[in-house]
Structure formats: C-alpha cells, structure tokens
Image: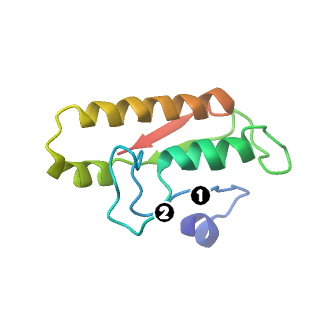
Amino acid sequence: MFLTEQYNQSFIKTYDFAFSGATVSEALVPTTEPAGLVDLQHQIEAQFIPKYGSKSPDLAPWTSSDALFTIFIGGNDVTNSYAAQNKTLNGAIIALYSVLLGEVCSFVCRKCACLT
C-alpha cells in the first residue's frame, strides 16, 4: 500500500488485506503474532468476498481484464510449521491455499500473481 500511495503516478487502486505474521490458516499453523491475527482464509472468506465479491462498482471499479491480484503468503507457514515435523502439513497448507485462490478467482480474478 505504501508504494501505491507514495509513488503512484496513475490511477491505480490498491486494496490491502495483509496482516504481518499471518498464515494460510490459523487452524493449520498458528502464528507467533498476537492472538486474533487474521489468517488468509479469514481475509478471503470473511473480508474480501463479502465486501468485494458482489462486484459493486463503487467499491471495486475493476474488471477481470484490468485487475491483477497478488497474494504473498507462505513464509510464516514454513517457519512456524517446521518445528511440528508433520510431513502432511505442507500438503494440507497448499491444498487450502489452492481452494482459497480458487474462491477469489471464481468471483473476480482472472490474473493473479502468487508470491511465496
């Protein structure tokens, strides 16, 4: 959000749902951050989709052809799950991540950059 607000020279809107320290799912990998930190699953299912999924032009004036969605997640999942030594945990994280990405794509997204 900082880069868009400070250096943007065009009419580009940025919507930021990020929480530092978040994981894909608090149920799979607890964060080391304060209790109540919003995980990616909550950000998508309880914040993004209810507010922007209906595609209100006033709130979300983009189209599928002119929007790029980025999701930067994974580092905290790897770091915080390493101690668990659970060999199936990473598969469960990636499976849920894929489901959540599919949810975003089913509403509005056609172009997505996933950073991990």
Q: Quadrant of the N terminus?
A: bottom right
Q: Which residue is mark 2?
A: 36
Q: How many marks?
A: 2
**Dot in front, 2 or 1:** 2
104 left or right, relative to 39:
right
Specify whether 15 is left or right of 81: right
The 10 Å Cα crowd at callout 2, few under 14, some 14 to 19, many 20 or more, is: few
Q: Nearer the viewer, residue 67 or 109?
A: 109
- Residue 30 in the image, given as x and y percentages of width and height: 34, 54
Q: Secondary structure at mark 1?
A: loop
Please tell me whether mark 2 sits on a helix, a strand or a loop: loop
Q: Mark 2 and mark 1: span between their CA atoms?
A: 18 Å
Q: In the image, what residue type sits under mark 1? A: Asp
Residue 51 vs 102, above or below: the answer is below
* Residue 24 percent across, percent down from the top left: 41, 45
Residue shown at 32% from the left, 64% from the top: 32
* Whether residue 114 is situated above or below residue 12 in the rendered picture: above
Q: Are marks 2 and 1 in contact (CB under 8 Å)?
A: no
The front one of 62 and 50 is: 50
- In depth, the one of 43 and 63 nearer the eye is 43
Residue drawn at 75 percent across, 42 percent down? 62
The residue furthest bottom is 6
Q: Earlier in the sequence, mark 2 or mark 1?
A: 1
Give the quadrant of the C terminus. top left
Above or below residue 98? Residue 24 is below
The image's mark for residue 1 is none
The tag on residue 16 is 1
Q: Choose between 9 and 89: the one closer to the eye.
A: 89
* Residue at image location 56% in from the left, 50% down from the top: 43
Q: Quadrant of residue 57?
A: top right
